[in-house]
Amino acid sequence: MLVAATLPRLAVLLAAVASVLIVAAPLVVAVLAPGLPDPGLAVQCTRLTALTVLSFGIAGYFSAALRAHRSFVPPAAIYVSYNVGIIGTMLALHALWGVRAAAAGVAVGGLLMVLVQLPAFIRNVGFGPARAKRAPRSRRDRDRPTLIAFGLIAPVIFFAVFRQSQVLVERFLAASLPSGAISHLNYAQKVAQMPMVLSLMICTVTFPVVAQAMAAGEREKARRRVEQDLALASLAVLMGTALVIGYAPQIIQVLFERGAFTHEDTLATASVMRVYGFGLLGHCLVGALSRPFFSTARPTWFPALAMGAGLLVNIVAGAFAVGWWGTYGIAAANAAGISTTAVLLLTGLGSRMVAIQVRRVAVSIGRLAVAAVAAGGTGWIAGPMIPDPTVSAALGCLLVPAMFGATGMAIRALEVTALPGQIAQFSSQLTQRFRNVR
C-alpha cells in the first residue's frame, strides 16, 4: 500500500523537476559555472544529464525498498550497470557527439540502474495489486499513507540535497579558476572517495539489523551494532585514506596519464586528492551515522540540520580559501564541512537516538588515525623510490596495510587486534543475507 501510494507521485514529482532543469538549463549553467567559455555545450550536456533526476530517484527508491526486504544483489549491481551505460554510449557515440556522448552515457546509465532492479522490485515488493479488493476508502484515507510517507522521507530528502550540494559549491567556486581546475577536482574526488564507498558497504549490509533493533526497542543491540559498524568502517576508510594519500601521484598516473592528460595534470590532481583525503573519514562517518537516525519510526531533522551546518562551513571556508589556495582551498573546505557534520552527528547520536559511548568511539577512531598517519607517511616516502608507477602502486597495496596493521598493534588499537574475528563475523552475516535473496 505504501509503495502504491508514494511511488507514482514521487515519479511525477521527479519528472517535473527534471523538466524544469531541462528548460532552465541556460540559467542553471550561468549560475553554477559563470566562467565557462562555451556555455552552449554545457547547456546541452546539462539537459541530457537532467534526465537522471528521474532515473536516479527511482533507482534510489528501488534500492531502499529492496534492502529493506534484505535483497542486496540488485542494488549492488546498479553501479556496474551505470558504468556500462556510460562506457558503452561513449564508445558508440563519441565520434559523432564528442563530449555530449559522455552526458548521454550518464542518462543511459541512469536508466539501466532502474532496469537492473525492476524485476527484483516487482518480485519482492510489488505495487500492491491486492488493494483493489479492499473496501472503498475516502480521499482522506487514501491520501494518509502518502502524507505519512512524505513526512518521513522529507528529512532524508533535505539531508541528501544538502550533502550533494557540496559538489555544486565546489563547481561554482572552481568556475573562476584557470582551465582544468574543475577536472582536477573531479578526478581527485572520484578516486579519493573509493575507500569511503567500500567502507560504507559494511553499514549498508547491517542497516536492516539496526532498523529492526530500533523498531523492536532493543536499544542495547542497536548500540552494539552501531559501534561495531563505526569501528569497522573507520578502519577500512582510514586504511584506504593512507593508501590514497601516500600513493596519490602513482595512482593518478596509472589511471589517467595518457592523451591530453599530462604529467602536470597528474601532479595537480594528486595534490588535490591528498587534500580531499583528509575529509574521507568525515564522509564515511556521515554515511554511517546518518543511518541510525533514519531507522526510527518518527522523522528526525537533526541529520539534515547537521548537514546544513556542514554545508555552511563548506561555503564560507571555500569562498575564503579559493582566492588564496585555489583548488586546494576548495578541497580543504570540503573536508572541513563534512568533518563538522560528522562531529555533530557523532555527538548527537548518543544523546538523541542510540546511547553509544561517544568518548570511547572517538578514542578508537583516534588510534586508527595514528595508524593511518604512519602508513600514509610511509607510502609517501616509499612511493617515489620505484620509478614504475604501476609497480609502485601495487607494492603500496601491500606496504600500507602492513604498516597500518603493525602500528595498530603497537598502539593496541582494539579494532586492529580484533580484526580477524570481526571479518569472520561480517562474512558470516553477508553470506546469510545473500542466502535470503530470492
Image (spheres, rainbow, N blue to C red):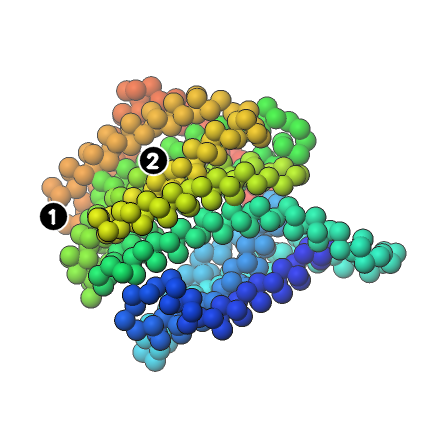
Q: Amino acid at mark 1?
A: Pro
In-image side of 322 versus 145 (left or right): left
Picture layout, residue 34 above or below residue 213: below
The x and y percentages for residue 415 are: 39, 25
Q: Nearer the viewer, residue 309 or 125?
A: 309
The x and y percentages for residue 163 are: 45, 48
Q: Nearer the viewer, residue 304 or 402?
A: 304
Rounded to the nearest whole Å, what is the CA distance between mark 1 and mark 2?
Answer: 26 Å
The x and y percentages for residue 138 are: 84, 57
In-image side of 134 versus 38 (left or right): right
Assign a secondary structure to mark 2.
Answer: helix
In-image side of 244 versus 92 (left or right): left
Q: Quadrant of residue 343?
A: top left
Write the residue at 52% across / 69% down.
20
Q: Quadrant of residue 39?
A: bottom left
Residues packed near mark 1 inside 10 Å, few (<14), some (14 to 19) or many (20 plus):
few
Write the residue at 43% across / 21% down.
360
Label 1 belongs to which residue?
A: 387
Write the residue at 46% across / 34% down.
344
Q: Amino acid at mark 2?
A: Leu
Query: Would you say residue 90 is visible in this rendering?
Result: no
Q: Circles 1 and 2: CB distance less than 8 Å?
A: no
The x and y percentages for residue 362 are: 40, 25
Query: Would you say residue 301 is visible in this rendering?
Result: yes
Assign a secondary structure to mark 1.
Answer: loop
Picture layout, residue 409 above or below residue 312: above
Label 2 belongs to which residue?
A: 238
Q: Quadrant of residue 333?
A: top left
